Image (cartoon, rainbow, N blue to C red):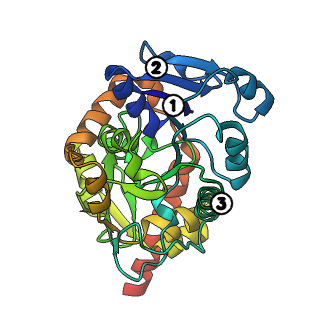
Amino acid sequence: MKALFIGGTGTISSAITRQLVEQGCELYLLNRGTRNVDLPAGAKILQADINDEAKVASLIHDLKFDVVADFIAYEPAQLERDYRLFKDKTKQFLFISSASAYQTPLSDYRITEGTPLSNPYWAYSRNKIACEDYLIKQYREHGFPITIVRPSHTYDDRSIPLGVHGSNGSWQVAKRMLANKPVIIHGDGTSLWTMTHNTDFAKGFIGLMGNLHAIGESVQITSDETLTWNQIYEAIADALGVELKAVHVSSDFLAACSPQDYRGGLLGDKANSVVFDNAKLKRLVPDFSATTRFDQGIQMAIANILAHPELQKEDPEFDSWCDKVIRVWDAALLQMKE
């Protein structure tokens, strides 16, 4: 198989890249070259900014692919560019959408590919929906061979997946835990969530590549494991070897008082219970199975982060914000008891 990835170094795509190279795929990566140091030997680099359409067109002038996948498109204009570049260059075009595009709030907590797409809380999700609409139009009117992939919360060994964190990543929450400080969990921590390790996601994604039954389809790829946010934070604390000190704070309150986009990231996503039905993926990729339990995956992630100080990005502004929120929250509770 001959494939081109736009991106290829992110949380989702890096595991796919490694597995494809190990399987002997002729893999091209189109990116700016800023994170290529960790790429597996054997991947072929086309160094360019995808937004420089003329340069990209010249790089792929003599190339055709079985699969082209865009991991970094977020707006319809970017897909319009991809269509111009690749409409005659590939047998299959895979677009990475998002499970956050599903109906929010949900009418049924069980999510299938037939769940309506609607998210009034988060522009990111609405843009992904618009991207899907554009691609479906090209498939229906021009036969552009699309497959839409909807990941949910996918993580790797470079970061800790959380509900509430700052703009500089999630390490500061782990640092608070290590310092025996309380950490914020949105809501009461009992809403349901799904975490998927990127190596498991890669197995499902690779099974869709070159799969003629996936053309024109939308497919979600997640683990079948469902956890509460309390369980997620407990697993993180266990991996760090500390006792969890949780403070549960209303998601509405967090969204109202934070400089982060918690209206989108919480109210439009993580504050809602989700349970994914992966029956469609398993019909298309019969041997798919997500085998990394969250407690196992987070142990590997934290061990890797602790061993690599460059991954421990501090966020003092977020740390101060957490202290303030917890102080105000505790004061309000104390006042109500007087």
Mark seen at residue 141: 3
Task: Measuring from the top left, give residue 120's x and y in whole percent.
Answer: 60, 75
Return the disc, 3 or 1, that comes first in the chain's sequence.
1
- Circles 1 and 2: CB atoms closer than 8 Å: yes
Residue 277, quarter of the rendered image: bottom left
Closer mark to the observer between disc 2 and disc 3: 3
For the image shown, how many numbered marks are present on the structure?
A: 3
Q: Residue at x 26, y 54 (%)?
A: 282
Q: In the drawing, does residue 53 fall left or right of residue 115?
A: right
Q: For label 2, count other residues whose C-alpha is less than 10 Å away and answer few (under 14), some (14-19) or many (20+).
A: some
Say which quadrant the N terminus sits in.
Answer: top left
Residue 290 in view: yes
Amino acid type, mark 1: Gly
Disc 1, SS: loop
**Amino acid residing under circle 2:** Leu
* Amino acid of disc 3: Glu
The residue nearer to you, when weighing 283 against 175, is 283
Residue drawn at x 66%, y 20% is: 62
- Position of residue 327 measured from the top left corner of the image (x, y, whole percent): 47, 65
Can residue 241 be seen by looking at this rendering? Answer: no
Look at the numbered disc 2 and give the secondary structure of its residue.
Answer: loop
The numbered mark at residue 39 is 2
Residue toward you, 252 or 106: 106
